[in-house]
Amino acid sequence: MQDEFTLDQNPLCLKHGVKYGKLFFWFAFAGELWLKKIMAEEKVRIDKWLWAARFYKTRSLAAKAVSGGHVHLNGSRIKAARSVQPGDSLVVRRGELEFTVIVLKLSGKRGPATVARTLYEETPESIAAREAGREERRLIRSPASRPQGRPDKRDRRKIRKFLRKD
């Protein structure tokens, strides 16, 4: 693209708008303003992308995670205002889970989960590590350690008797 761009130089100008690739923008001002709008569509903030890709439920939670150091872009810690581009590698930690993903597409809007899954590709190493962690946690939890439910009348009497004993 050219730095200096006017609408009369653009062969893609239409009667009521500007066609740029598959996108169609309405314009009210001539010159550089619509070009900046098109250029802005190519960059998305990392917190907005994480929200759109459904790693976090709200954008503010995504921003807190980024500023808290739970998200790394290409191996380095970043700020929430940093833009993400296709091909970037992200490491996202949510609790005990850690996802390593490659950004495939950009989106600033939150859509259905099926669309969100197309925005990134998780690496095979990440999938294997998550599965190993899931299996490890499953083996650590034993079924005997879980309570059967609420104590019944007899159990409550035993508990009271035990607690009163000094």
Image: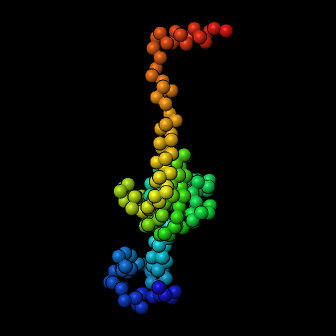
* Percent of width and height locating residue 86: 47, 69
Residue at x-position 51% and y-position 67%: 88
**Residue at the extreme bottom:** 9
Q: Is residue 105 visible?
A: yes
Q: Nearer the viewer, residue 24 or 44?
A: 44
Residue at x-position 41% and y-position 90%: 8
Q: Nearer the viewer, residue 81 or 150?
A: 150
* Percent of width and height locating residue 45: 52, 64
Q: Nearer the viewer, residue 148 or 30?
A: 148
Apparent side of residue 32 relative to residue 118 in the rendered image (left or right): right
Residue at x-position 52% and y-position 86%: 3
Q: How many marks?
A: 0
The way the protein has been coloured in the rendering is rainbow
* Percent of width and height locating residue 160: 56, 10
Apparent side of residue 40 relative to residue 10 in the rendered image (left or right): right
For the C terminus, the image quarter is top right
Q: Does 44 appear above or below 19?
A: above
Q: Does 49 appear above or below 96?
A: below
Residue at x-position 58% and y-position 60%: 72
